[in-house]
């Protein structure tokens, strides 16, 4: 009997923890703002290889509204994204405004820290010399931390490209930070 009680308590506490989501805690909504710097055009590998980053005069700013979901049993969030790339100097002509949906999933999590990836379609308002299509896919790699019960901060790398649907697909890459509020 003494061995059964700890097992039952462990099972019950695991089920209680399954009701929360690392991105949200016990909240059901989140709003985040991302501020990023361009790391140049290029492949998806630029998400995780800082040694090949080539900083360009572009800044991408994105507002993200999210709700909690489970994706293959991983803590995840379903996002509505609105963002704009501001290009200047030698990157003139690479500006775009876009809207998209995406799913971010926490692959690892511990004590409020999490590491994750995200993907989703993004529709831009223009074509340019780096990516010829308006429809692109947004891929993201991020490390984050929740704090003060309702807040989180993330460091993220973001890649936009069209998966080679058109001959011109150099891609856009960014690195930056976000701050989010859960409610």
Image (tube, rainbow, N blue to C red):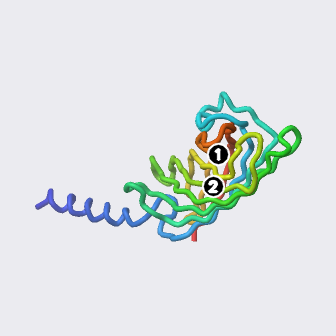
Residue tagged 2: 122
> Residue 47: x and y, percent?
61, 38
Q: Secondary structure at mark 2?
A: strand
Badge 1: residue crowd in 10 Å (few <14, some 14–19, many ≥20): many
Residue situated furthest left in the rendering: 1
Q: As displayed, is residue 2 above or below residue 142?
A: below
Residue at image point 64% right, 60% down: 81
Disc 2 from disc 1: Cα separation: 8 Å
Quadrant where the N terminus is found in the figure: bottom left
Quadrant where the C terminus is found in the figure: bottom right
> Residue 39: x and y, percent?
72, 37
Q: As displayed, is residue 74 above or below residue 50?
A: below
Viewer-closest of 158 and 136: 136
> Residue 172: x and y, percent?
69, 42
Disc marking residue 142: none
Circles 2 and 1: CB distance less than 8 Å?
yes
> Reading the chain from its start, which is encountered first: label 2 or label 1?
2
Residue at image point 49% right, 65% down: 68
Disc marking residue 160: 1
In the displayed structure image, the side of residue 75 where residue 58 appears, left or right = right
Badge 2: residue crowd in 10 Å (few <14, some 14–19, many ≥20): many
Q: Secondary structure at mark 1?
A: strand
Residue at image point 60% right, 62% down: 151
Residue at image point 58% right, 47% down: 140
Viewer-closest of 97 and 56: 97
């Amino acid at each position: 009997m003494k061995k059964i009680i700890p097992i039952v308590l462990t099972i019950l506490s695991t089920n209680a923890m399954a009701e929360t989501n690392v991105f949200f805690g016990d909240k059901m909504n989140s709003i985040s703002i991302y501020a990023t710097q361009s790391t140049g055009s290029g492949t998806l590998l630029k998400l995780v290889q800082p040694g090949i980053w080539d900083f360009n005069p572009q800044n991408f700013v994105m507002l993200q509204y999210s709700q909690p979901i489970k994706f293959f049993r991983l803590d995840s969030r379903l996002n509505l994204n609105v963002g704009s790339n501001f290009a200047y100097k030698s990157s003139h002509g690479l500006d775009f405004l876009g809207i998209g949906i995406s799913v971010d999933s926490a692959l690892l999590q511990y004590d409020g820290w999490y590491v994750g990836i995200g993907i989703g379609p993004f529709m831009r308002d223009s074509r340019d010399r780096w990516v010829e299509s308006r429809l692109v896919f947004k891929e993201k790699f991020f490390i984050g931390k929740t704090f003060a019960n309702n807040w989180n901060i993330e460091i993220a790398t973001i890649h936009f490209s069209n998966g080679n649907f058109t001959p011109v697909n150099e891609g856009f890459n960014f690195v930056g930070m976000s701050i989010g509020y859960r409610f």
